[in-house]
Image: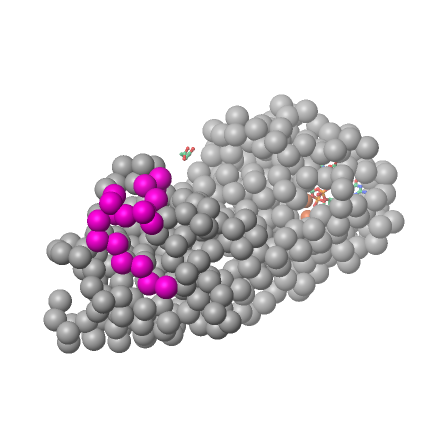
Amino acid sequence: MTDSEKLELLIDFEKTVARERDLDTLLWKMADFARDIVNADRCSIYIYDEKRDELWTKVAHEVERIRIPASKGVAGYTALSKEIQIVVDAYDDFRFNPDIDRATGYLTQTLLSIPLVDHNDRTIGVFQAINKKEGIFTLEDAELMLFMSNYASATLENAILNERLRKNQLKLIDKLSNAAEFKDVETSNHTKRVGEIAALLAHHTGLPEEEVEQIRATAPMHDIGKIGISDDILLKAGPLTPEEFETIKRHTLIGYDLLRDEEEEILHLAATIALEHHEHFDGSGYPYGKRGSCISLEGRIVAIADVFDALSSARPYKRPWSLDEAFDYVEKHAGSHFDPDLVAIFLNHRDEIEAIKNRFKDTEF
Ligand code: C2E
Ligand code: SIN
Ligand code: SIN
Ligand code: SIN
Ligand code: FE
Ligand code: FE
């Protein structure tokens, strides 16, 4: 690659980084650009996990996720020293940790390893290029990768913080969902099971993994609007009067208003699910009587997961049904309450659904 080609690539990289907010995408782009610019066979980016004192490969060309102790290998050496490490013959180098090669069946020969540090000069990770295609990594290669890591570090730091924040938010909302639906955080795994069953359906529907994960995270919030419904109604031991049922129907709209957010895509999905999880495929549901594919796919998915799990669980107003009865109910209501294509997928994966029921049991009380 000529110098002007490298410069072009760097400018391209700057533009890309400036626009990127998502951590995974950002890291993949860094890895791709770096591989091309220093002419390496592959690149890995490790993120430092302070709590466990480990480095783990967040992205790596052709390698599964790997965790290593932060003190091990060239990666560990880089993280601790916060200095560039160049290795010209890995298997003859005391810094090198062959565990990763052993796990992947790859043969590392040359390595260029760059520390990723935040604005407080704390290690956030390690950026590595592996196996230069010709010769060994040079100081110029090191400078190029250092430039990239310095340039990306603020964005990277932000993206890492954002990701952590989002995870914490989801955890918080998960706890709130449970409290809203049951007024008791300890006893029920219903919200978790709905998340898992919905994710299973999403997966077998063929949605991309990223969307499957978003559904796993947001489906548990479907009933968060029940926080706005009085306990007298929610915890009533017997059947509801028509007026009480009208009141309870509002939990869909309340949930939608609570979760609606213009900027956060994941909250937008959560809001849609809260709004639509009681719509019926034939248009007889609430709050709007939407029909068929006018109901979002996620709404149709969660409808099945929620009803199946509500039927097979104890509620203040009913005994749990047997799994057979709950599966039969879903089957019988294909096309009326539920999307028939999704019901077919649901029934095809009965074993996996039973496994979820077993894994996330409710505590006896
Ligand atoms: P939920 O307990 O989470 O139930 C969710 C959905 O599961 C229900 O939506 C319904 O479609 C299905 N489901 C649950 N139990 C049964 C059942 O015994 N038979 C049948 N056929 N379906 C069942 P739905 O009906 O729109 O109810 C929404 C929410 O209203 C329920 O959420 C629950 O919080 C409340 N609710 C519904 N019926 C009663 C009741 O008889 N007594 C009390 N206290 N609350 C009720
Ligand atoms: C190391 O950091 O020592 C090993 C890196 C690798 O082989 O990918
Ligand atoms: C599968 O992923 O198992 C195929 C989808 C289906 O069950 O219809
Ligand atoms: C409830 O707390 O109302 C029922 C909890 C359960 O599903 O076990
Ligand atoms: Fe609901
Ligand atoms: Fe529910």
* 149 magenta-colored: no
Q: Quadrant of residue 66?
A: top left
Q: Residue at x 41, y 63 (%)?
A: 82
Of residues 126 and 170, the one nearer the viewer is 126
Please tell me which residue lies in front, 150 or 60.
150
- Percent across and percent down for residue 220 are 63, 48
Determine whether, in the image, residue 9 is placed left or right of residue 28. Answer: left
Residue 88 magenta-highlighted: yes
**174 displayed left or right of 44:** right
Nearer to the camera, 118 or 152: 118
Looking at the rendering, the stretch of residues picked out in magenta corresponds to 83-100
Q: Is residue 9 above or below residue 233?
A: below
| Quadrant location, the N terminus | bottom left
In this view, 1 is above or below 311: below
Q: Which percent across, then down, holds residue 97?
A: 34, 44
**Quadrant location of the C terminus?**
top right
Q: How many marks?
A: 0
Task: Give the x, y percent position of residue 329.
Answer: 62, 30
Scheme by which the image is coloured: one colour
Can see residue 174? yes
Quadrant in the picture for residue 33: bottom left
The image quarter in which residue 100 lies: top left
Please report the residue visible at 58 percent of the width from the left and 62 percent of the height from the top.
165
- The residue shown at (46%, 61%) is 124
Looking at the image, residue 275 sits to the left or right of residue 89; the answer is: right
Identify the residue shown where x is 33% and y is 49%: 95
Please name whichever residue, 345 or 157, is drawn nearer the observer in this view of the structure.
157
Whether residue 340 is visible to the viewer of this picture, yes or no, is: no
